Each structure stands twice: as C-alpha cells, then as structure tokens.
Amino acid sequence: MEKLTKIEELPFQLESYLMLGDAVIITDYKHIIVNVNKEFEKVTGYSGDSIIGEHARFMKSKMTPKSTYTSLKKMLSEGKPWSGVFVNRKKSGEIWHSSITISPIQVGMDVYFVGVFRELEQLKQGIYLSENKRIETQRELLKVLAISCEIRDPGIEEHLFRVQELTEMLITEHVQRHHLKIPKNTVHHIIHSSILHDIGKSGIPEGILYKPGPLTTYERKIIEMHPLMGVDIVNKFSKELHSELIFNQDIVRNIILYHHEKWDGTGYPNQLSGEDIPLEARIVAVVDVYDALTSRRPYKDSWTTEDALSFIYEQKGKHFDPFIVETFLDHFERKAIIS
C-alpha cells in the first residue's frame, strides 16, 4: 500500500477523530496505519510519517494474551466495536499499557478501524504495572533467581551484587562518555541482567568449581561449558513465564553466553572478537574480572585495587574492549582524586 502522508487524504468523516485528546490510530480494513494524531505521537514516540503505511502489529509485545487478540478479531469481524487492554512497546522500548476501544467505521464502500487509546500509566487507578514498578520488580526477581541458583556458595551473593553495581556504573558512564544512543530501557536491562552472568555455574560439580589447585584440561573444558548451561537455564525459565516482564531475553543471553569472550578472539565459548562481542557482554567482562580479582575466595587471596586495575590495563585490547577499559580506569582515577 502507498503510504499516506497528508491528513487531507483521509475521508473527511474520519478527520474529526484525530482531534480527540486521547491517542488515536486509524487503519484500513487490513490494519494498515492510515493516520495517527498528535497525542499518539507524544505517547508512543513514533511520528506519523514514520509509521503511516505500516501494519499496526509493529507495536506488539509478547505480553498481551492471545485471548485478547482472539476476542478483538471476533468482534471486529462481526462489525462491532471492541474494548480491552493492550501491552505494547513505545519507540524507546518502554512497555506501554493502554485501554483501547477499536471501532469499525464504514465510509462509502470502505471500512476503517479507529482505535482510541488511553495510557494506563497516566491514570490514578488501574490494574497494570508502571514502568518504575516494572524496573523495581525486574531487579528483585533477577536477584532471587541468581541467588537461588548459587545457593551452594553463600559468598557468591556479594559478588553478584557488586558486579551489578559496577555494571551500572560502567554502562552509565560509558554511554555518557561516548554519547551512545542506547535507550534507557536497554540500559536498565543490561544492569539488571548482569547479576545472572554466571548462572550456568550452578550446573558445574563443586569439586571442579571450588578446586583449590590448577584445573586439568578436562576440568577446564567443563568450566567453559557454564555459559551454555546458563543459556539453557534461561531458555527453560522463559518458557514457563512471560519472561519479557522480567528480562530482555537477547540481553540476558548475550551476557551469559559471551562475557568470557575476549577482544582478541581467544575467549570462549565461540571465540568472538572485537565488536562482534555484544556491548553488554564486554561491559560485564571487565567488572566480573575486576571483582573476582579483588575478592577473597577459598581457593585464592584477594588482589589490591591497584594490582587489579593494573591487570585490567595490561589486558586492554587483549582480553577487554580498550574503550570500555578507558572508561573503567577513568572512573577509579576520578574516585582517587576526590578521596
């Protein structure tokens, strides 16, 4: 379908709907977007010019129940209006809960659908999960999941929390330092998901995981399987729940699977190199190694902050993304000056 770009191309019978104070979307009978109003652009972040001609399903998330769409199709096929709640995504990636009424409007021989949205987050009452509450819930649920999978080692809990805190510092400062255009929602997902980075170690035998001496070649191979085990755990978990409410599957899998990859391609499990390694995994790689070095474990003594930072510097461009290392070291330099 050729995209419509002017309001005047709409049948005049539909123009008045675009003047409503609520968000309005108008589609043809195939659910191709014909026009939207200013409030729709304001709420969703999408400009009319960018989405006119697109199918309305482009905003869908996996969180709206299938039964909702079944009911919608049934009512509209009978020529009746339908009302319900959608959980869609804004352009920023944020979840958008909306109460919507979609009405079929006959204009001559053609049928159009006029959808009037009201954003539930802006209402004083309602059964929905606000963005702030979703972020808080996501963080707590991922903590519970991570800790429950590492219950054999009580000391690991503090490590997981520190990795999460360091990830928040590093991703925030790196985005600011390099003016990266990463949506705030994506940053939240990276921070929260970092706590799951070693969840696959729950499947490693304790005799290997906490062995005080050097590992054999066979034992090293077993250890290097933990990223794959971690992804398997997440895959099983995501099948049971609306996992999108709890974590972004792509981000959490990238962190788990690739945080042991190295910038020079000598890491595991896939020997990725450079920017082929997802940014979130490159961030967690630095903070995970730093905290592991500076933490005392049953099988090793802790390093001083200075020694750990020297190691991070030495591995710049080898193990770690050199630009991320610069951001990380700059943070500690500024912290030392302040103190």
Image: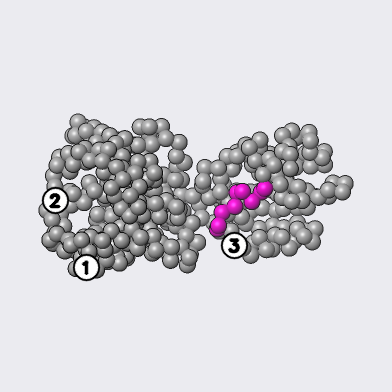
Amino acid type, callout 1: Glu
Q: Which mark is residue 259?
A: none
Residue at 44% across, 57% down: 246
How crowded pointer 3 is (Cα within 10 Å; few <14, some 14-19, many 20+) is rated as: few
**In the image, which residues are magenta?**
55-63
Q: Is residue 200 left or right of residue 24?
A: left
**Taking the image as drawn, is residue 114 in sight?**
no
CB under 8 Å between discs 2 and 1: no
Which of the marked residues, 2 or 1, is nearer the chain's N terminus? Answer: 1
CB under 8 Å between discs 3 and 2: no
How crowded pointer 1 is (Cα within 10 Å; few <14, some 14-19, many 20+) is rated as: few
Residue at 46% across, 49% down: 132
Amino acid type, callout 2: Ser
The CA distance from mark 2 to mark 1 is: 21 Å
Residue 52 x/y as whole percent: 68, 40
**Taking the image as drawn, is residue 27 in sight?**
yes
Q: Mark 3 against mark 1, which lies toward the viewer? A: 1
Q: Which mark is residue 206?
A: 1
The CA distance from mark 3 to mark 1 is: 41 Å
Residue at 28% across, 47% down: 266
The CA distance from mark 3 to mark 2 is: 50 Å
